[in-house]
Amino acid sequence: MTTYPHLLAPLDLGFTTLRNRVIMGSMHTGLEDRFYNYGKLAAFYRERARGGVGLIVTGGISPNRQGWLLPFGGTMNFIGDVVNHRKVTRAVHEEGGKILMQILHAGRYGYQPFVVSASERKSPISPFKPRALSESGIESTIRAYVRCAKLAQKAGYDGIEVMGSEGYLLNQFLCARTNLRTDRWGGSIENRMRLPVEIVSRIRQAVGTGFIIMYRHSLLDLVEGGNTWEEVVAVAKALQHAGATILNTGIGWHEARVPTIVTSVPRAAFAEVAGRLRREVTIPVVASNRINMPDEAEDILRRGDADMVSMARPFLADAAFVEKAAQGRVDEINTCIGCNQACLDHTFSNKRASCLVNPRACHETELEYKPAAAKRRIAVVGAGPAGLSAATVAAERGHDVTLYDSSGAVGGQFKIAMQIPGKEEFAETIRYFSRKLELTGVKQQLNRRVTREELLAEGYDDVIVATGIKVRKPAIEGIDHPKVLSYIDVLQHKKPVGKRVAIIGAGGIGFDVGEYLLHDPSLGLPLSIDHWTAEWGVDLHAKTGGGLVPPVPSEPVRQLYLLQRKASKPGAGLGKTSGWVHRAVLARNGVVMLAGVSYKRIDDQGLHIVVGGEERLLTVDHVVICAGQDSLDELMPPEGTAGGPRFHKIGGASLAAELDAKRAIKEGATLAASL
C-alpha cells in the first residue's frame, strides 16, 4: 500500500490514461527560445519523465510573433519548428511520460514592439504600449493558435495547454480591467470570453478527440477590474463545452500586488478555490500554487479539491520527486523553498533558469555528477550551503569525504534564515542535505574547529574551505555600546530586543531582520491562511472583482528604522520577483526606511545620524548591525605554499560581499563535480 494512494492513482481521460495525478507545471527555462538549446531542453524533461511525473507542460511557446514574451522567443508557427520539438517529445515518451506544449501569447506583457491586446492599455511591466487587435487581427490570432496546436500534434506532443491566466493575452480579453472594447469581443462576460472559447473550440475541431487540451484558467485575478467568481465559473463551463479536456488553475496576474508563489505564501493556500470550481464542472480540475511536498498534494486530492495537482518549481528542485514519494523516500526529496532566485528571477532577467537548491536544473548536460575516475580523500570545512553541496556531490561521485564544522548541527546561514517569518522552508533544505550526508557516507566531525595543521596531518588530497563569513563591525563611535547587537545576536542567539530599533544595513539581511522583529510571536509560524489573506486583502471566494478586499494588517509590534549609507532605494538589490513583497511588508508595518545616512555615534540617547545634511537622533532601545560581512578564510595557506593538499575556497569564504546561497550551492557542486 502506498502512502499516497490518491496522488499516485492513474487518471483515465477516456482516450488516454495518465500514470498518476502529478503535473509538472509550465516553467519558462530560457532553453525554449533558441533552436540550438533543444537538446538541453530534452535532457531536462527526460530526467523529470524518468522521475515519474504523470504529465509535463513545457514553458510557453508563442503562436506568432505578436505573442512573443521576449524578442525572438520560442515560437511554433511553421513546419520547420517541429523538428526541434520532436527531440523533446521523444525524450519524454522514451521514459514513459506524457507532455503538453503550452501555447502562450504574451499580449501586452511582451517585451517587444509588436505587442497587441484587447485594448490600448499599457502594462506596468512592459515598456511597450499595445495595439488593440482589430476584428481581422483577432481572426488571425485564432488561426495562429490553431496552427500552433496542429504543429504541436505533428511534433508528437500529447496535447497542448492554452495559457489563459497570469494576465497574458486571453486573460486581458477576459477582464474589464484591460478589455475596454464595445464590439462583440468586449462588454459582457459572454463577449469577453468569446476569444478563449473560440480558440479552444477551433483547436478541438482541428486536432480531433484524441488530443489533450488543457486550459489554464485564472480563478483569482487579484487585480482591480478582475472577474468575479460567477464570471470565472461561467467561463469554465463555456471552455468545457468548447472541448477542453482539463482545467488547470492560475492565481494572480504578474502585475498583481499580492504574492502568490513566494515562500511566505502558506502552502496550498489556493487549493480550496480549485475545489469550488471542481464542483461546478465535470472535467478534471487541477490545483496549483505553493504545493511543494507529497503530503499537501495527497491531502488536496483526498479532500476532493482537485483531480490533479500541478507543481512546477518542485521539479526544478528534484527531478525524482514522484519516484521518491512512491518509494517511501520523502525524506530524500530536495524541496522547493519558493525563493525564486534562480528560476523566476532568472527568467525575468532574460537568463537561463535553474534552481538555488539544485544547480543541475536546466544544466543537465553540463553539470554532471559522474563517478570519479580516482577516489580522493577530501576534507570539507564548513557545513553551510556551500560545504553541504560540495561534500554530498563529492561523496556521491565516490570520493572519501569528511565534513567539519564548529557548530553541533549542519546548516550554516540556513539555520539563521529559517528563523525569518516566511522562510521556514529553508529547514527543508537542511533536512534534505542531512539525509544526503547519510546516504552518501560523508563522515561528520561536528563541534570541532579544525586547524590547518590538523588538516595537513590527516593527509587529505583536497581541502575545501567553506567556512563562511564573520560579521563586519562598522567604524561608528559607540559601536560597543550595550544597545548594539549583531544580526547573529538577534536571529541565532535570541537576545532580547526593545520596542524601538534601528537596523543599520538595508540589504537582504537587514530586511530579514526587519521582518523577524515585526513578527508577533503569538501568531506562530508559519502564518495561517486566514491571517495571510487578511494581511494581503485576499477574498478566496472572489465575491468582488479579482478577489481583492481591503487588507486588515496586524498592528506592528515594534517601531523600526531601516538605514543605509547608499543613496539608492532601500531594498533595490533584492530579488526581482520577491523583493517587492519584502518592501511591501515593511512599509505596511510603518518601518521608516532612510537612504544616504551617515552615522555619527551611538550612546545612551540612541543613534545619532545625518540625513540630507540634517542631524537627527533616533531614540531607540537597540541598534542591530546588518552592515556586511567579511570572508572567514583563515584556513587557506599563504600564497606560494608548495606541497600538501590542494586547497579550494567556496561560498562566503570566497566572496562575502553579499551572502548568496544560490552561488554558494552552485560553487560547491561545480567544484565537487570537477574533482
Image: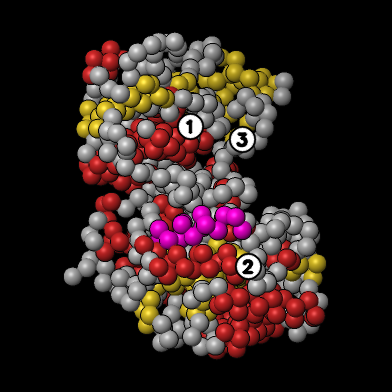
Q: Say if mark 2 contacts mark 3, CB within 8 Å.
A: no
Vertical side of 373 occupied by 547: above or below:
below
Dot 2 surroundings within 10 Å: few (below 14), some, or many (20 or more)? Answer: some
Residue at image location 49% in from the left, 51% down from the top: 362
Looking at the rendered image, the disc whose residue lies closer to the viewer, 1 or 3, is: 1
Mark 2 and mark 1 lie on one chain; the one further toward the N terminus is: 2
When asked about the image quadrant of residue 110, the answer is bottom right
Looking at the rendered image, the disc whose residue lies closer to the viewer, 2 or 1, is: 2
308 and 608: which is toward the camera: 308
Identify the residue position indicated by label 1 in the image.
659
Element type where label 1 sits in the image = loop
Identify the residue position indicated by label 2 in the image.
81
Q: In this picture, which residue range is highlighted in magenta? A: 35-48
Amino acid type, mark 1: Leu
Q: Please, what is the dominant secondary structure of the magenta stretch?
A: helix
Identify the residue position indicated by label 3 in the image.
570
Dot 3 surroundings within 10 Å: few (below 14), some, or many (20 or more)? Answer: many
Mark 1 and mark 3 lie on one chain; the one further toward the N terminus is: 3
Amino acid type, mark 2: Asp
Where is residue 355 drawn, in percent x and y? 46, 48
Vertical side of 669 occupied by 228: above or below:
below
Residue at image location 60% in from the left, 15% down from the top: 600
- Residue 674 in the magenta stretch? The answer is no
The answer to whether one can see residue 590 in this image is no
Q: Say if mark 2 contacts mark 1, CB within 8 Å.
A: no
Element type where label 2 sits in the image = helix
